[in-house]
Structures are given as C-alpha cells and as structure tokens.
Image (cartoon, rainbow, N blue to C red):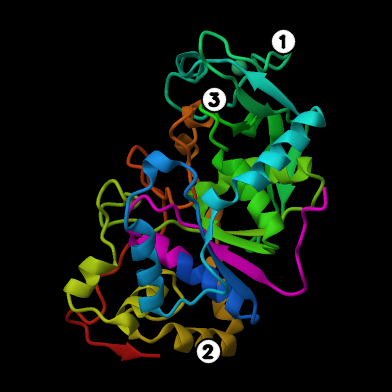
Amino acid sequence: MGLDLRQQGVSGRFAPSPSGALHLGNLRTALLSWLAARRFDGRWLLRVDDLDRPRVRPGSEASIVEDLRWLGLHWDGPVIRQSERRGLYASVLSWLRRSGRLYPCHCSRRLLADISAPHGGFTPYPGTCRMLEPFWGQRQGRWPSWRLRLSEGTVAWQERWGPPGTLDGPREIGDVVLRRADGVVAYHLATAVDELTLGISEVIRGADLWASTGAQVAIIEALGVPPPRYGHVPVLCDDDGRRLSKRTAAEGLVALREQGLDGPGVIGWLAASAGLVPAGSRLSAGELLADLRRRPRAWDEAFGADAKDAETNEDNEVREGTEDAEETEDAEGTEDTKASESFRIPPPAGSGEGGQSV
Ligand SMILES: [Zn+2]
C-alpha cells in the first residue's frame, strides 16, 4: 500500500497517551527509547496517542512535553498527535475493508465477557461473526466493530534483545478490532499505521505490551509491509512488586522534583533501575548517551535476559473486544495485573548514599 516510509538509519519514537502525568515507568521507557535511537544518531519522535478522547486529560500533553524537556530528552520535529491523523487511518481502514480483510462484528461486550475464560485469562476472540454474512449497518441501534481476519499461522517479529518474538495468530492474538463500535479508530490500527508512515525502524516499549506487539505486527503484515524491530524492556515495579500505573498514582517527576531531585539525579536513578549505571549515579541524558557509546555492551547486557518474562497475559483479556478500555502504549500496569519479575524502583539517588558520578 506504499505505507512504508522507513529511511536509512534508526528511527524511534515515544508514544504516551495524554491520560495523566507520566510515571517513572513511562519516563524510563522514554529514556531507553531515546538512547536506542540516539546511540546511532537516529531520529526520535514524540507521538501523542490521543484518539480516545474521554481518556484525554487537559494539560496532560503539556506536562509530558515539560517532563521530557526537563530530562533533556529532546525529540525531532513537532509533537505528532494521532487525533490529527484520523484521515490517514480512515483511508487505510477503507483500503483494508475493500481488500476483504475485515469483517463486521456485532458481538456485545457482555457476550465477549461471557466467552472469555472465567479466571480472567486472555481469550482471543473466537471468530463468532467471522463466518456470518457481513452486515455493516446498525443492529439494535449499534454499529459493528471492524475486525481483521487473521490467517492461520504464526505472527513473528525481530526482537532487539533475544530470539524473534512469535505468537500464534488465531490462538494467541485473535481477530483484532481495528475500528470500534463507537466509530473510534482502534489503538492497534493507529499505532501500526503510524510506525509505518512515520518510518519507525525500532520500537522500544514495556514488556507488558508483548501481546499488543503481536496484534500490531499482524496488522502491519496485512498491509504488506515488514514490521519494525521491537525491543521489550522489563516493566518498572514499585516496592511491593506492583507495576506502576497512572491510576495508582505512581509517582511522577513532580513528586521527585519536590523531594529535591534534579535532572542528573533522576536520569541516574532511571538508568540505574535499568542496570545501565551503578545505583546513585548522577548524570545528564547527554552524559549517559556518551557513556553508553563508550560501553556498547552495557546496553545489551542490561536487557539480554528475558525481558519477555515480564509479560502478563492477564493484561489483554476481554479488553481486546471491548469498546472503551484499550491497552495503550503507556498502560504499563493497570492495577489488576499481578507483579512481574522485573526491576524495582531503587531508593532515590542522593538520599543518604551520596551521589556517585559516572
Ligand atoms: Zn462478533
């Protein structure tokens, strides 16, 4: 479809949804994604995933921008907003629909909940509407959602650290919703289209998004383009081993700044939590970048272990088929997920142990 605009060199992005202040897990993903691109003098874009209007919080984008600038994580070009790219998504959707890859799904949320496993584990959509005569109109006052028909077989992608990622299409992903019953373009579709049209070559994201990656790679394949490479990094946990989330009011930068931490303290803290520098390090984003260029292996050693193990299948469960609760890029840790074995937040740098420079 002529969507692949990848150029020479590395292109990365950070794609938060403006549904609240970034928490430390989000900020660490931003830092790692920035480092992954800048290590090779690549481009790094900031894309705000603001399609789901009810979830957008006023002032949120401004606070994201301010946090990234304060940390010295500067992006290329203007801030990209998905809400301003709806025309592009609509044209891709109609192209897919004309090509026969989509079918209308009239299943209600209740029906999908009944289908899902009683223990709440992930159950792919069973394809109830797949074999029916397609009816694209309203039924009982409700429009259908549009699903992508996945073929039998494995969905695979290159993984930055470790062996290729694979998921079984029908059994582990299911027919992905691309357009919700309320008419909103689904997060997976918008994200897949954006990776291609923005020329993204490598996506660094939390390991909790492993299943989302599968869905997005399936869409990218349906568009006839090779997917970008992915790097799934372990999710940051709080002291009790729970993943951070905006809803649990995980601490953001404002709280750290109020505790007196400065930029180098925060960067050192985030980098130490990822195993890139010793605990207590103080350094700017630029200094960390220069340091990692001198020690290229440190980068791979930090993540060579099974980042994928932090995946929790519970995350995706019924949401896949529901209309209003989607897993988005920075959904790291909605509160119903169990703890994953991953990094814990270390005590704030400079609190007692003294700063150590790198
Ligand atoms: Zn259905």
Q: 59 and 131: which one is in front?
A: 59
**In magenta stretch: residue 18:** yes
Task: Find the magenta span and give its range.
Answer: 1-29
Give the CA distance from mark 3 to mark 1: 17 Å
Q: Position of residue 127 (x, y in %)?
A: 66, 19
Give the residue drawn at x 40%, y 53%: 18
Q: Main secondary structure of the magenta part?
A: loop
Above-or-below relation of 333 to 320 = below
Name the mark nearer the viewer: 3 or 2. Answer: 3
Question: What's the residue type where badge 3 is placed?
Answer: Ala
Disc 3 within 8 angstroms of ligand 1 (CB):
no
Above-or-below relation of 84 to 298 = above
Give the residue drawn at x 73%, y 30%: 150
Observer able to see residue 300: no
**In magenta stretch: residue 69:** no
Quadrant of the displayed image that contains ligand 1 = top right
Question: What's the residue type where badge 2 is placed?
Answer: Ala
Give the residue drawn at x 54%, y 84%: 292
Residue under label 1 = 132
Q: 266 and 21: which one is in front?
A: 21
Q: Tag on residue 181?
A: 3
Observer able to see residue 255: yes
**Within-10-Å neighbours for mark 1: few <14, some 14–19, many 20+:** few
Question: What's the residue type where badge 1 is placed?
Answer: Leu
**Within-10-Å neighbours for mark 3: few <14, some 14–19, many 20+:** many
Helix, strand or loop at mark 3: loop
Asked whether disc 3 touches disc 1, contact meaning CB atoms under 8 Å apart, the reply is no
Q: Tag on residue 290?
A: 2
Helix, strand or loop at mark 2: helix
